[in-house]
Image (cartoon, rainbow, N blue to C red):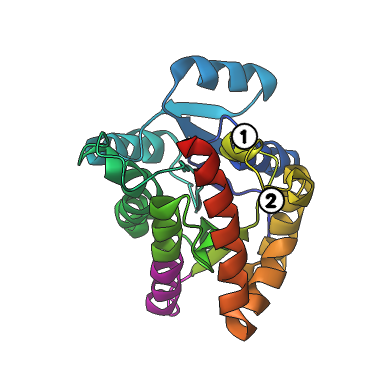
Amino acid sequence: MELKNNTILITGGTSGFGYLFASKLMALGNTVIITGRNPAKLEETKIQLPGVHIFQSDVSNPASITQLFEQVTKQFPELNMLINNAGEMRKINLQDASIDLLDITREIDINLSGPIRMVQQFLPHLKTKKNAAIMNVTSGIALVPFPISPVYGATKSGLRSYTKSLRVQLKNTGIKVFELVAPGSGTPLNDKFINDPGFNAGMLMDPEKLIDVAIVGLMKNNYEIYPGMARMMNVMSRLAPGLLFAQMVKMTEKAMAVTKK
């Protein structure tokens, strides 16, 4: 895919992968639009990335997505690329009775329902463009369950399945469908795990290098992009899924044992 002179919408663009995507894609000569829930962070990002366009929006809210579509397509009719990046990852003890029924599905609303609704809302517009693309950001945890983050893992597995189906259904259109299978990385998403026993921060991939790999993958039309450890996890999930899952179980048991003390 040609990565210049595009108009690109990135959800969750004020930090982590979204911020880096915005910075690097702008440097390649693209018009970049980012979303976020926090107005102050959006304004701060605009100062850090002069030229980026900001819209306050919440992917977990269908009405907010509809409003975003109306605003963005009116102001940027040449929009031809969507990167569904916004996400949340929590450590959840499913035996914690204090978690209410709305809170337990929060990650589903953000990580799974959000991208599905974004695609559904923007798809008719993207189909009018000759060179269009959708990228959904999943995770290495889409390949193997991580029991300490059970809902997050379920959302990323679901998004991976949806992305594969979307690619099949859009194969006769001008829209390319990409999946970034992101390994653990040094972004705010993983900060809550740093002090957990068994968690090796040295295994986290540098987020800037990760996004560089993602951009090269886009340019080469690699529809499934596996940076760093994600490539090994993809192989292991097929050749030795039990061994890979056992490692995730050990990490979870150690972390939960500490929590119970």
The CA span between labels 2 and 1 is 33 Å
> Is residue 95 left or right of 141 when viewed as pictured?
left
Q: Percent position (x, y) of residue 64?
A: 28, 34
User: Helix, strand or loop at disc 1?
Assistant: helix
> Which of 72/231 is in front?
231
Residue 191, labelled with which disc? Answer: 1
> Is residue 214 left or right of 100 when viewed as pictured?
right
User: Helix, strand or loop at disc 2?
Assistant: loop
Residue 237 position (above or below residue 114): below
Residue drawn at (52%, 60%) of the image: 133
Circle 2: residue type: Lys
The span picked out in magenta is: 160-174
Q: Is residue 243 visible?
A: yes
Residue drawn at (64%, 26%) of the image: 51
- Mark closer to the chain start, 2 or 1: 2
Crowding near the residue tagged with mark 2, few <14, some 14–19, many ≥20 C-alpha atoms within 10 Å: few
- Circle 2 residue: 4
Q: Is residue 223 visible?
A: no
